[in-house]
C-alpha cells in the first residue's frame, strides 16, 4: 500500500493487521535495530568510532557521519540507566512522532526530523571551529527536538499526572541544561536549545499555513526576495483571476452539507491546490483534520474486515 499521492500525506504508510504504520514507527524500528547491532559489534570488538560525528573527520571527507551518528548507541551500552532512557526515547519518538505526522503530514515530519539531525551537527561544527573538542553520537538530541515540536503543537495536553505539556518541556529543558552545564557539555546544551528553538519556529510556520522549510525552499525564498519566479506555471494567470476564487469557496461551503467525507475532503484539497493552505479558515482546518481522521478510521475498518 505504499506510493500514496500527495493528498494521502496525512495517512499511514500502510496497515498491518488493521494497525496503522507511520514513518515514525519505521524510525523506531531502525533505532531498535541499531541498538541490537551496536551490542553485537561491541561484543565482537568491531569499532564504531568512524560512525560518530566528529567535525574534523566530517570536513575531511567522512560525510556519512552526519547520517550515522544518531544510530550509534555506545553510551547506552556502558550505562544501564542510559539503556532505560533509550526505551523512553523510543516511546517519545513513537507517540510524539506519530502525532506530529498526523498533524503536519508525512513529508513535513520527515523534513522536521532531518533538521533535528542536522542542527546538532552544525552546533558541534561551530564549536569545533572555536577550538572546542566535541563529538556526537546517539539519538538523544534528535528525539528531544521531536518532543519539543510535539509540545508546541499540543502545549496543553496533560502529561506526567496531568501537568500541561509545555511545563513538562520547560522543566525537562531546565534540568538538562543544568546537567550539561555541570558537565561542561556545551555542545549538548546548545544543541538542545537550538533544536527546541527550531521546533518552535517550524511548527509556528506550519500553523501559519506554510510548509516546513527544507533544502529546496531556500532557493524559492531567494527567488521571491529578488522578484524571480521559481518553477513558473503558465496556468495560474488564466485560472486564478479575482472572480474565479469565489466559486471555489462556494463549493467548499456547500460541501459541508454533503455526507460523503471524501467529497468534502476533495473540495478542501481543491481549495488548497488553487489558493494554498493559508487560504483555509480555522473552521476549514478543523474540518480537514476531522475528515482525515474519519477516513483513516474507515480505512482501518476495511483492512480489519479483510
Image (cartoon, grey):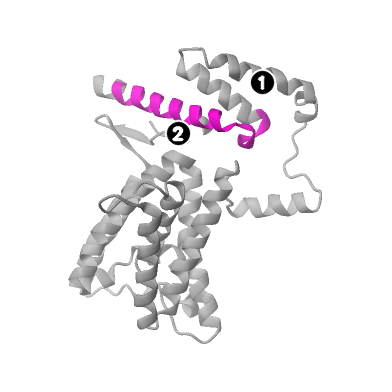
Quadrant for the C terminus in the image: top left
Task: Evaluate if marks 1 and 2 touch, with contact meaning CB atoms under 8 Å apart.
Answer: no
Establish if 71 lies above or below 183: above
- Secondary structure of the residue carrying numbered label 1: helix
| Magenta: main secondary structure | helix
Dot 2: element? loop
On screen, residue 121 above or below 23 = below
Mark 1 closeness class: few <14, some 14–19, many ≥20 residues within 10 Å: some
| Crowd band around label 2 with a 10 angstrom C-alpha radius: few (<14), some (14–19), many (20+) | few
- Name the spot of residue 191 as percent of width and height, x first: 46, 69
Q: Which residue is mark 1?
A: 248
Which quadrant: the N terminus? top left
Name the residue: 66% across, 20% down: 248
Q: Evaluate whether residue 136 shows in this view.
A: yes
- Seen in the picture, residue 38 relative to 267 is either above or below; the reply is below
Q: How many marks?
A: 2
Which residue is farthest bottom? 131
Label 1 – label 2 distance at C-alpha = 28 Å
Q: Nearer the viewer, residue 231 or 131?
A: 131
The x, y position of residue 85, in whole percent, is 25, 63
Marking on residue 3: 2
- The magenta-colored residue range is 274-301
Quadrant of residue 209 in the image?
A: top right
Locate residue 60, reporting x and y percent. 52, 77
Q: In percent of the image, x 35 and y 82: which residue is there?
A: 182
**Relative horizontal placement of residue 267, taking residue 146 as reference (left or right):** right
Which is more toward the observer, 112 or 13? 112
- Quadrant in which residue 169 is drawn: bottom left
What residue do we see at 47% from left, 61% from top? 196
Amino acid at each position: 500500500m505504499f506510493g500514496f499521492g500527495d493528498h494521502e500525506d496525512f495517512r499511514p504508510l500502510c496497515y498491518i493487521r488493521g494497525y496503522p504504520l507511520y514513518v515514525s514507527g519505521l524510525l523506531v524500528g531502525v533505532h531498535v535495530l541499531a541498538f541490537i547491532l551496536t551490542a553485537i559489534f561491541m561484543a565482537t570488538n568491531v569499532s564504531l568510532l568512524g560512525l560518530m560525528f566528529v567535525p574534523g573527520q566530517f570536513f575531511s571527507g567522512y560525510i556519512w557521519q552526519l547520517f550515522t551518528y544518531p544510530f550509534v548507541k555506545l553510551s547506552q551500552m556502558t550505562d544501564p540507566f542510559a539503556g532505560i532512557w533509550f526505551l523512553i526515547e523510543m516511546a517519545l519518538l513513537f507517540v510524539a512522532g506519530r502525532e506530529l505526522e498526523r498533524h503536519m503530514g508525512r513529508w513535513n515530519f520527515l523534513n522536521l526530523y532531518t533538521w533535528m539531525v542536522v542542527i546538532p551537527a552544525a552546533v558541534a561544527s561551530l564549536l569545533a571551529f572555536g577550538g572546542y573538542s566535541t563529538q556526537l553520537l546517539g539519538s538523544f538530541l534528535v528525539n528531544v527536538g521531536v518532543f519539543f515540536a510535539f509540545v508546541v503543537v499540543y502545549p496543553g495536553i496533560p502529561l506526567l499526572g496531568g501537568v500541561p505539556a509545555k511545563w513538562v518541556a520547560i522543566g525537562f529543558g531546565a534540568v538538562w541544561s543544568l546537567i550539561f552545564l555541570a558537565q561542561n557539555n556545551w555542545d549538548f546544551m546548545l544543541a538542545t536549545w537550538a533544536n527546541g528553538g527550531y521546533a518552535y519556529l517550524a511548527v509556528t510556520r506550519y500553523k501559519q499555513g506554510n510548509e516546513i522549510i527544507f533544502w529546496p525552499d531556500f532557493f524559492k525564498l531567494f527567488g521571491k526576495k529578488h522578484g524571480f519566479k521559481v518553477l513558473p506555471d503558465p496556468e495560474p494567470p488564466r485560472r486564478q483571476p479575482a472572480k474565479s476564487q469565489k466559486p471555489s469557496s462556494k463549493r467548499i461551503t456547500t460541501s459541508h452539507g454533503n455526507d460523503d467525507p471524501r467529497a468534502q475532503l476533495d473540495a478542501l484539497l481543491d481549495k488548497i491546490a488553487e489558493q494554498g493552505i493559508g487560504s483555509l479558515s480555522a473552521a476549514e482546518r478543523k474540518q480537514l483534520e476531522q475528515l482525515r481522521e474519519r477516513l483513516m478510521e474507515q480505512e482501518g475498518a476495511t483492512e480489519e474486515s479483510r
